[in-house]
Amino acid sequence: MPSRPSKRLQTFPNPAPERDYRIHMEIPEFTCLCPMTGQPDFATLVLDYVPERKCVELKSLKLYVWSYRDEGAFHEAVTNRILDDLVAAVKPRKAEVVGDFFVRGGIHTVVVARHP
Amino acid sequence: MPSRPSKRLQTFPNPAPERDYRIHMEIPEFTCLCPMTGQPDFATLVLDYVPERKCVELKSLKLYVWSYRDEGAFHEAVTNRILDDLVAAVKPRKAEVVGDFFVRGGIHTVVVARHP
Amino acid sequence: MPSRPSKRLQTFPNPAPERDYRIHMEIPEFTCLCPMTGQPDFATLVLDYVPERKCVELKSLKLYVWSYRDEGAFHEAVTNRILDDLVAAVKPRKAEVVGDFFVRGGIHTVVVARHP
Amino acid sequence: MPSRPSKRLQTFPNPAPERDYRIHMEIPEFTCLCPMTGQPDFATLVLDYVPERKCVELKSLKLYVWSYRDEGAFHEAVTNRILDDLVAAVKPRKAEVVGDFFVRGGIHTVVVARHP
Amino acid sequence: MPSRPSKRLQTFPNPAPERDYRIHMEIPEFTCLCPMTGQPDFATLVLDYVPERKCVELKSLKLYVWSYRDEGAFHEAVTNRILDDLVAAVKPRKAEVVGDFFVRGGIHTVVVARHP
Amino acid sequence: MPSRPSKRLQTFPNPAPERDYRIHMEIPEFTCLCPMTGQPDFATLVLDYVPERKCVELKSLKLYVWSYRDEGAFHEAVTNRILDDLVAAVKPRKAEVVGDFFVRGGIHTVVVARHP
Amino acid sequence: MPSRPSKRLQTFPNPAPERDYRIHMEIPEFTCLCPMTGQPDFATLVLDYVPERKCVELKSLKLYVWSYRDEGAFHEAVTNRILDDLVAAVKPRKAEVVGDFFVRGGIHTVVVARHP
Amino acid sequence: MPSRPSKRLQTFPNPAPERDYRIHMEIPEFTCLCPMTGQPDFATLVLDYVPERKCVELKSLKLYVWSYRDEGAFHEAVTNRILDDLVAAVKPRKAEVVGDFFVRGGIHTVVVARHP
Amino acid sequence: MPSRPSKRLQTFPNPAPERDYRIHMEIPEFTCLCPMTGQPDFATLVLDYVPERKCVELKSLKLYVWSYRDEGAFHEAVTNRILDDLVAAVKPRKAEVVGDFFVRGGIHTVVVARHP
Amino acid sequence: MPSRPSKRLQTFPNPAPERDYRIHMEIPEFTCLCPMTGQPDFATLVLDYVPERKCVELKSLKLYVWSYRDEGAFHEAVTNRILDDLVAAVKPRKAEVVGDFFVRGGIHTVVVARHP
């Protein structure tokens, strides 16, 4: 998958860096394309992280999620890649990404990836 | 954010100081303003603490929550600040504050902060 | 909105034309673009009709729904248009289309259109 | 579809023929085959009828439902056919059959047929 | 089924006979025996009636329901019989009895009988 | 039951007397005593009315509901009496009172009274 | 209550004026002040209308709802006033406004107003 | 709060004293009075304990809960007191009492106390 | 309680004895009699165990549960006895029995017993 | 049970082999036959695993599940066998299979098997 430099996750300084606290975000508006058939896939994403120095800025997260709309992405790969991008952008103490995908072939798939 | 001396959290003596027990409060009527756009934000707050010598007085908590109505406050910052104020007022053995904010930009954010 | 000749709804003969019966379809995978901002919108569509001579073929319906992915469409207009297309393709005795759109600006909109 | 003489619906005399009352049966264990692809389809059937002189015998209904396991059947056709068979067997004052089929191609289909 | 004279439904005078109002009772503790196999059957009963001059007394209703514990009774027959007994005892303006029986042979049966 | 003059329902003028509109109130905090055993009974009350010239004032309603705490009252009688008192106080175009009582003797009773 | 000229509901032309269809909007972010105590009140608003020539523009609706934040308003009056303003702005064939207010004094109030 | 000698919790011998097992009781019918305003408060109590030699007798528990009806009691104090009384009466290996109180001032309070 | 030799739990050899796995069974059709009043009691049983060499045979379990229909049994005693019988019959690595009884005296009781 | 060589589970390379992450799949379309009576059984399968080098390919999983349609299989045996086949095919770091079977004889059985 090519890089998408204009869709970077933006951050802002953590307002409570001395404390371990959790930020949990549910995003029911994720869609990408199946790399094999080109057909649309849909998922609810859940991001959950403990910030260190930086937090994800909400609007850039919306644009980042939107940037997958025309990309081919397998369930397992895309969930891990979103976790990689989140970790690279905010360097959290802990992070988890869940991709909860709509039924395909009568099977409902959920992928759960954690860092570290 | 300026101090609001008249909106202090009041306390009363813990009726069972010899026991570790938990007080859990759900407050669906929190609203503040977005510091960037000035638009209203809404959340359900959940406070959960183990008292040491003092408990939060219910009416002052209502007024304290109400005092955010005209203040600008980011999700992450306001949740941590409420925990700071709760800890300062009641010096609990343990405390947790959850800010469960309404959808913005298609994203539902929940912030969970714990002390200590 | 330009015509999309290759995305026609296909039909098959109604297997029980002598009886008034109802076909109800829920499609949680609808997405289009906001004509003003270009941002993605999401909805669950519900189609409900009483067939006369023809029924909607499932695979062509999937492709038809998919064809909105890159089109700009207002909530009210797109729901009525899908009803128009359904009516034109299957000439049902009765039909209803519901567009249940995701929250925008803190408001959850549902559009319900009936024929005749 | 060939006839299946050994899978007839059995009946017993209505114990309250002087009264209009309703018998409602939910059967989550229906499966048949897709006539085009040969792949299994699954549905929950709901039967609802007002008996005249006869009621459906429970065990024969179980066997009747089971008899579709190896047959090809479209959603719309099979729901109407089960209603036809119910009407032929018990000659009810009123009857309704609902076929609530599992998701195929991201679309959840429900067929609702009534007699008369 | 033999008569059970000691298990009569008792009544008390309707406290508001000039008004059409509805009394609705849910009884999840019904059990009887299958007349063919002798095995226990279970159901939730719902009684709903508009009283004329008399209301059902609660304790006698409990004993009446209990009296089916050792009796054989088909789903359709027992629901109609309970309606008959209710109608005979309180002579209501309107009445409905629902027998919502536990799954047998993978089939969940509900019988709904109304008077008049 | 003796009269309770100090527990009258207060009213205020209907702010939209030219329009038929509905006011619906759910009150989960109703308790009275069983007139036969003296034991406490509990219920959720639902009041629903279309005002003519007057609306029920909220605080007086709270006190009115509270006034049943030490009174003996049968389910059917108390629900009808509350409707009578509501009708006498606000003279509504239409009104309904529902008393949804907690389980007694394994039976869950709901009483629904309407005016006129 | 003073007029708020800058908070007018904006409209756009109905895209399907030849058809009777329904637009349903749920707005969980309503808050105003109690005119007697000055304390905040909270509600979920539901707007439901059949447009004639005009539809409500979403962003102006958000601002309109927001304009109640610092106004005193009784439950019954404010629900009717929002219906009046909706009717004045879009002149719908039919309209309904529901105000579902948070618990006050142990009582949960819902006001339902219809036009015409 | 004065002692209430006639409302003692009764016990019976634990039928399985050699095993650590849990008894869980949900009691939705708790009411007391606010010690400051005299107004009624309502709660659901949950008792959960591991018995040693004795179990709580059900009828005496009902009377014990009933004995709070006319007493003033703060949320935190009454929950701890019920745990104290349970511990004194049955000397359990472990015990927990939860008081889940109805909304007051827009705040829903739950108190959770454990022994030891 | 007398022995019931003909109602023994039957077993079959564990098909995967080398693996620790869990068998969980929910049985909503349990009824017995109250030893003090003779009145019927109802419960949902949950059995959960890790088999060693033997598994419980389904039909014998149904008959075993059925055998309590005419027996007097206290909540705490009967739950522990069913666990004892399960342990004696299948000698599991671990086992748990839950008896979730219907409301009596406004109290909902659940008994949870584990082995070892 | 004979081998079914053409129904092998296919795999693809794990796209994130350096990370411990979880893949969770819910499959509500499982059916097999009872080995004793030949009657159909139904279940929802849940597969949950942490991949090492390989992931299960979705389409082959659908065919694998489908291959049980005409096979006799006991609840406990078939759940363990599916876990064995999953482990053999993908050699996961951890895996769990849950078979949640429909009610038989009034009993709802769930089998939960884990590796290692």
Image (cartoon, coloured by chain):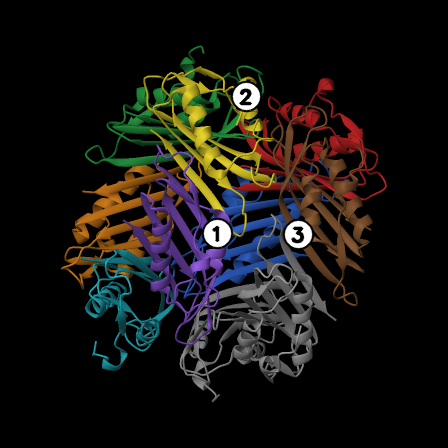
Chain colours: A orange, B cyan, C blue, D red, E brown, H purple, I yellow, J green
- Residue linked to disc 3: E25
For the residues labelled 2 and 1, say whether their Cβ atoms are less than 8 Å apart.
no
Label 2: element kind: loop
Asked whether the viewer can see residue B26, the reply is: no
Quick one: I38 or D107, which is closer to the camera? Answer: I38
Position in image of residue H93 (x %, y %): 31, 43
Quick one: H84 or J80, which is closer to the camera? Answer: H84
Disc 1 from disc 3: Cα separation: 28 Å
- Callout in the foreground (2, 1): 1
Quick one: A33 or D81, which is closer to the camera? Answer: D81
Label 3: element kind: strand
Q: What count of labels does the image hold?
A: 3
Asked whether the viewer can see residue I47, the reply is: yes
Residue C18's place in the image compared with B71, above or below, is above
Amino acid identity at mark 2:
Arg
Position in image of residue J102 (x %, y %): 53, 30
Quick one: I6 or J38, which is closer to the camera? Answer: I6
Tell me the quarter of the picture where residue E21 sits: bottom right
**Which of the numbered marks, if any, corresponds to residue I4?**
2
In the image, are marks 2 and 1 on the same chain? no
Chain of the residue displaying label 2: I
For the residues labelled 2 and 3, say whether their Cβ atoms are less than 8 Å apart.
no
Amino acid identity at mark 3:
Met
Disc 2 from disc 1: Cα separation: 33 Å
- Callout in the foreground (2, 3): 2
Position in image of residue A13 (x %, y %): 16, 62
- Residue linked to disc 1: H60
Chain of the residue displaying label 3: E
